[in-house]
Amino acid sequence: MTTLTLSRALNEGLRKALEDDPKVLIMGEDVGKLGGVFRVTDGLQKDFGEHRVVDTPLAESGIIGTAIGLALRGYRPVCEIQFDGFVYPAFDQIVSQLAKMRYRSLGKLTLPVTVRIPCGGGIGAVEHHSESPEALFAHTPGLRVVACANASDAYTMIQQSIICDDPVIFFEPKRRYWDKSEVDTEADLAGAQPLDRARVTVEGSDVTLLAYGPMVRTAIEAAIAGRESGRGIEVVDLRTLSPLDMAAITASVRKTGRCVVAHEATTFAGLGAEIAARITEQCFYHLEAPVLRVGGFATPYPPSRLEEHFLPDLDRILDAVDRTFGY
Amino acid sequence: MTVDADSAITTAPPELIQLLTPEGERVEHRGYPLDLDAEAIRSLYRDLVLVRRIDTEAIALQRQGELGIWASLLGQEAAQIGSARALGPDDMAFPTYREHGVAWCRGIDPVQLLELFRGVSHGGWSPEEHKFHLYTIVIGAQTLHATGYAMGVQRDGADEAVIAYFGDGASSQGDVNEAFVYASVFNAPIVFFCQNNQWAISEPNERQTRVPLYQRAHGFGFPGLRVDGNDVLACYAVTKKAMQAAREGQGPTLIEAFTYRMGAHTTTDDPTRYRVASDLEAWKLKDPIERVRAYLARSGQAEPDFFAAVDAEAETVGIKVREACRTMPDPPTLNIFDNVYTQPNPIVEAEREQFAAYLASFADTAFADSDGGTR
């Protein structure tokens, strides 16, 4: 076990993937000498060369479009989109090509492309640097969508995503890049939690709190606060957003009878809406209260001096938890 | 092939590379000596006639309700056959949705093309087996896939090159311009083959560009040239040379095949609303097939028997395509759920099971069809 920041854990995971498979490539803007604006690819170009860690022209559609071509040729590209708000120029290539090409080919083509996207707010950034576009990709059949929340998962999940033969949209919680946790870099990947499984992070019996990515830490803090007031909050780190691990979600909700979903993304038509609908369908007779959602408002992301009000925090989550006991 | 240091790009008259005039006269071009014997030219003629016959049949099948839509290649046969016959067996081609002639040269059964336009599949052939990627319908998207594929060829150190097909309308797309940038800065082994058929549905070439399209290449840092797109020999020669340059590490070339879309954009389109009949008449005189026929006949490289045999073969192919199309079954209903992911996906599988159960609930009613689905 070593203690790593989430950013460093990703770096180690990418390094391992580059070592394990000569077909793995890293491509994106500033991923080479600079090591990425968040230093996730720090030192990789120096060790693996310019042909495997590729500084691309500043054109996101080009990053994904050429990655598709490289995948068709047998490579396994890992693309970095520098910030969440810059993925949209590549949206057509992701949604119309990357997601659909296997289906189009009747299964003859395989596109093992990983798209890394630093996501979420809370870093005091200018516009387009704090968004949470995961629902757009979860809504797109053919893509898998995952979100890591801590260094240990970052290390294993990035490797599992690269090994996965389907395209994976890999969300990285940018305000947690510098959070440290224990990572076992010696552990066998085969023994790790599978990529399509959620994880109960804090056990509790009174209410289920579903979170992913940057909200997981906030959810754990809420559970600790809840415990002090005698309320058992069970935190489930979803980890996978498409597919959803409904077995884990429903197991927890059937136990607690209450559920709150928290995410930074706009609540309207967000992941929480899909989760709430499915819980209602599958756990109706276990529910003591409607599934409540806590998330961003139905507004564009505000200027950063206001973001602390936009982002769900401990108090807004606990408020929602309290409201589930009011029915 | 080097970039011309031509500062007066917009005023220089475009050179049109031609080896066979519309009247069927062979002309020499010092940059493009032709390495084809009489048999090879006869073979190109056969390709041209057969793909036009398949195209004619497909239009008829659409009119009779057997196809949902068809995108005709009429007028573009030479650009497609010439360029595709110039490819090596391992060279990869990335088409739009109109490259039926290229598909023919890559060994795709025409019936597989009809599957897509009938709505039976989105494209069922094996791209690697034929070295011909699936049709791409989003305009220009495939130029980036081709460029990425070429970057892979480069990493493999393979003696191969890639060709990306697109049209004059696509030249305005961001993806095509990004493909030019990527191919240029990485010196990728790729040929960009633009069939400028003058029309992007109803929009003329002038709505896409103020300069001849081939001159765009200069700004991206690689050579561009314009070839008579109705001259199969010239299209063959320029493509062969550009592909060889790509294989030798000289990077990309843009070929603008100057041609004309003789038919509608697709069978849903009505070109009489936006273009004049006299244009069409003028281009009819430049027909890509007639000039080869005239040349072969006049130079004594083909006898009347040869032309009759090709026409008879075309009829046979037309009938075969027609019958195969009319008897093509719909796919089984539950194929909807296949091949979304490489592994079973719980969301997709749950929906498959639910829908199968729903369909099965009609099994004992008069509404059930032969494969258990409902109408």
Image: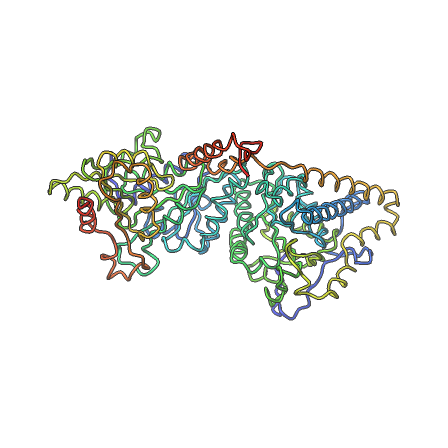
Q: Position of residue B195 (x, y in %)?
A: 65, 55
Tell me the quarter of the image containing the N terminus of chain A.
top left
Q: Is residue A307 left or right of residue B216?
A: left
Residue B149: quadrant of the picture:
top right
Q: Camera-side residue: B345 or B44?
A: B345
On screen, residue B31 versus residue A291, left or right, reads right
Decide: is A164 above or below B241: above
Q: Nearer the viewer, residue B153 or A305?
A: A305
Q: Quadrant of the C terminus of chain A?
A: top left
Instruction: Return the x and y of residue B375 as percentages of the image width and height.
Output: 55, 39
Residue A275 sits above or below residue B261 on the image: above
Across and down, in percent, residue B12 comes to 66, 69
Residue A302: tell me if it is visible: yes
Task: Classify residue A108 as left or right of residue A56.
Answer: right
Quadrant of res B210: bottom right
In the displayed structure image, the side of residue A67 where residue B215 appears, left or right: right
Q: In this orientation, which residue lies closer to the viewer: B293 or B8? A: B293
